[in-house]
Structures are given as C-alpha cells and as structure tokens.
Image (spheres, rainbow, N blue to C red):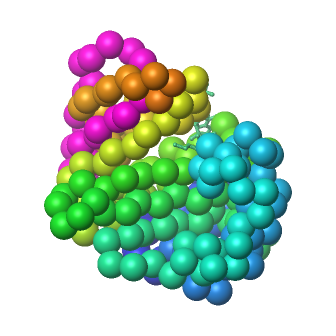
Amino acid sequence: MTTRAGVADPPASVPGLVIRAIRPDDAAALQAFHHRLSADTRNRFFGPHPHLPDEEARRFTSLAAGQQALVATFDGQIVGVGRYIRLGTGDAAEVAFVVQDGYQGHGIGTELLTLLARLGWDDGIRRFVADTYADNRAMLDVFMRTPSAATVMKTRRDASAIHLTMAVTPPGAVLTWFGDDL
Ligand SMILES: CC(C)(COP(=O)(O)OP(=O)(O)OC[C@H]1O[C@@H](n2cnc3c(N)ncnc32)[C@H](O)[C@@H]1OP(=O)(O)O)[C@@H](O)C(=O)NCCC(=O)NCCS
C-alpha cells in the first residue's frame, strides 16, 4: 500500500519497479516516456501528439485539487502512468492508464488501478468512469479482473468506444460483477 507521497510495493513480476505519486520535477521524464511509447500506445492515452509540449507536461505533473497521478518507474525512468480527475464536485472521477510497450502484461496497470482506488477512496471518490476502445482488451481486462480495487457496475457501448462506470471498492471488500463478459 502507498500513501500520497509514498512508494508502493511493486508487482512481484517486475523487480525494481517503484510506484509513487507524480511530482512537478517529473515533467522532462514524462516527455521522455511519451517519446518512448509506440504511436498506438501513445494515441490511446495522450491522443495523437507526436511530442508532449512543455506546457502540457507541466500541467500533467502539477496536480490540481481533485486530481491524482501515479508513476511507475524503473531505473529512474517512467514506464507507466495512472491518473484520475474528479468530475465536478461529485464523488466520481475519470481514470486512465498507460504502460510503456515493453512493460505491458506484467501487472503494472493492475497495480496502478489498485493504488489509485485506495487513494480515491480516501479522497471521497466512490465511482470511477473510463472510456476505452472496445478493442482494448488489456484495458478492459484490467477493469474486469480487479474487483478488489473497482467493480464494473455499468457499461455503455458507443460506436467503437465503451464507457464504463465502476464502484470503487471499499478497502478490504470484494464485490462481484454479475453482468455479461465484455
Ligand atoms: C491498458 C494498459 C494500461 C494495461 O496495462 P498493463 O500493465 O499491460 O496491464 P496488466 O499487466 O495489469 O494486465 C494486462 C494483462 O496482463 C496480465 N497480467 C496481469 N498481471 C500479470 C503478471 N504479474 N504477469 C504477467 N501478466 C500479467 C493480465 O491478466 C492481462 O492479461 P491479458 O493480456 O491476458 O488480458 C496497457 O496495456 C497500455 O498502456 N495500453 C496502451 C494505452 C491504453 O490503451 N490506455 C488506456 C486508455 S483508456
């Protein structure tokens, strides 16, 4: 488990990985991370920008109220990011994740979701919402297979996208998804 400024235990499959809160001095490292991503991975999270402008990197790494972002680092380099942004003044927040191509499939996305859910719960966030492409198996699997962090309550298909609403799981509880598989 981690704290706002703390460091989490890494997934056992990636020894040496550190997960911590993003910091303003991560801006250059975030730009380097953005640059290392494949175009497909980059576009799914950052949108179609070949470069991450200084101003955007600064904004991304300086969290406003209602925002939280974690970075997964390996050897001092960012290899994954997970963030939520509270929607208005309610108890819902939008979540999104990106893991560097060579590091995908090792549990980092799952770990980031788990830790964000804990931080969100402590911040009064009770629902996560996310939009993902319907063909994004990895992202859908992370959401569907991590009920210890968040439980998918509702899905809406909209052309090529799926909009998910998840209940943030209270620490220590596990809920179960009884709907159809996505
Ligand atoms: C979606 C994304 C963030 C998921 O992150 P990830 O670190 O690859 O996710 P995880 O490793 O936790 O889980 C994904 C897969 O790895 C598997 N996995 C989980 N823990 C694992 C472990 N310890 N060892 C090996 N595999 C593991 C999961 O079961 C899942 O397997 P599947 O491919 O058979 O479905 C990542 O693939 C990504 O960055 N994609 C591009 C950007 C993107 O689409 N972002 C979403 C925008 S909404």
109 with respect to 106 (left or right):
left
> Residue at coordinates 79% horizontally, 68% vertically from top-left?
32
The answer to which image quadrant residue 53 occupies is bottom right
Give the prevailing secondary structure in the magenta stretch: loop
Name the residue located 81 percent from the left edge and 60 percent from the top edge: 35
Q: Quadrant of ligand 1?
A: top right
Q: Is residue 172 visible?
A: no
Rendering coords of residue 8 (x, y %): 51, 66
Whether residue 43 is situated above or below residue 134 in the rendered picture: below
Q: Is residue 135 above or below residue 124?
A: above
What x and y, as percent, mark residue 77?
76, 69
Magenta stretch holds residue 114: no
Determine which quarter of the picture holds residue 153: top left
Task: Please give the name of the residue rendered at 42% of the width and 52% of the height, measured from the top-left corner.
Answer: 95
Give the residues in magenta: 162-182
User: Residue 6: image x %, image y %?
Assistant: 48, 77
